[in-house]
Amino acid sequence: MNALRDAARDLLYREALFLDTQRWDDWLALYTVDCEYWVPAWKAAHQVTEDPKREISLIHYASRAGLEDRVWRVRSGRSVASKPLPRTQHVLSNILVESLPPDDSTTGVAASGCVVHANWTVHQFMLKSREVQVLFGRSEYRLVEAGRGLKIARRKTILLNDLMPAMLDFYSL
């Protein structure tokens, strides 16, 4: 379990580094082809949406192709909201790694993976407005063994301060 925990933490730290340094291809490579990237919306003060196919989400991509398209739009300049890109700093804390039960067919994740919970804060410096913004929340990752390491099969991110003065995008979470 120690080796799995260390590998899972390293993966999350790598993801934060790649986002902060805008290494988009390296960031995308952390995800499986059939990954899900989901940021549910709030439907009540303490309740988020539960089904991205039937309820509103702040962000939802059902596969890495959606993430790849979003990265392409940011790189190409077709994302007006992302011009210029903010400078970001991702900070992770309270990382908890849980191994999966041997026959957990309910998650769709092989027992060779794990579930990881983490709290995060992202500080953004908006170049255009010269403002600093802070976003924070928690994420649940489902990681799977892939080749010589772990990859992200699912990331569910709860944005706790969803009434913020910023445009929201993948690099902000």
Image (cartoon, grey):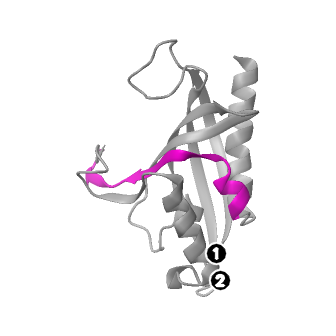
Q: Nearer the viewer, residue 110 or 99?
A: 110
125 falls in the magenta region: no
Q: In the image, 20: left or right of 170?
A: right
Residue 89 is drawn in which quadrant?
A: bottom right
Badge 1 amino acid: Pro
Q: Is residue 10 above or below residue 104?
A: below
Residue 80: percent from left, percent from top: 52, 85
Q: Nearer the viewer, residue 107 or 173?
A: 107
Q: Is residue 25 above or below residue 75?
A: above
Residue 117 is drawn in which quadrant?
A: top right
Work out which quarter of the rendered image holds the N terminus and state it.
top right
Work out which quarter of the rendered image holds the C terminus and state it.
bottom right
The kind of secondary structure element at disc 2 is loop
**Extent of the magenta region:** 24-46
Q: Please report the residue visible at 73 percent of the width from the left and 56 percent of the height from the top.
A: 26
Which residue was labeled with disc 1? 86
Residue 135: percent from left, percent from top: 53, 60
- Confirm whether residue 159 shows in the render: no
Q: Is residue 169 above or below residue 160?
A: below
Kindly indicate whether the residue at mark 1 contacts the one at mark 2 (C-beta within 8 angstroms).
yes
Q: Please report the residue visible at 47 percent of the width from the left and 13 percent of the height from the top.
A: 103
Does label 2 or label 1 sit earlier along the sequence? 1
Residue 99: percent from left, percent from top: 58, 20
Which residue was labeled with disc 2? 127
Q: Please report the residue visible at 59 percent of the width from the left and 53 percent of the height from the top.
A: 121
Q: In the image, 51: left or right of 117?
A: left
Residue 107 is drawn in which quadrant?
A: top left
Badge 2 amino acid: Leu
Residue 145: percent from left, percent from top: 65, 30
The kind of secondary structure element at disc 1 is loop
Q: Nearer the viewer, residue 34 or 136?
A: 34
Q: Please report the residue visible at 66 percent of the width from the left and 47 percent of the height from the top.
A: 30
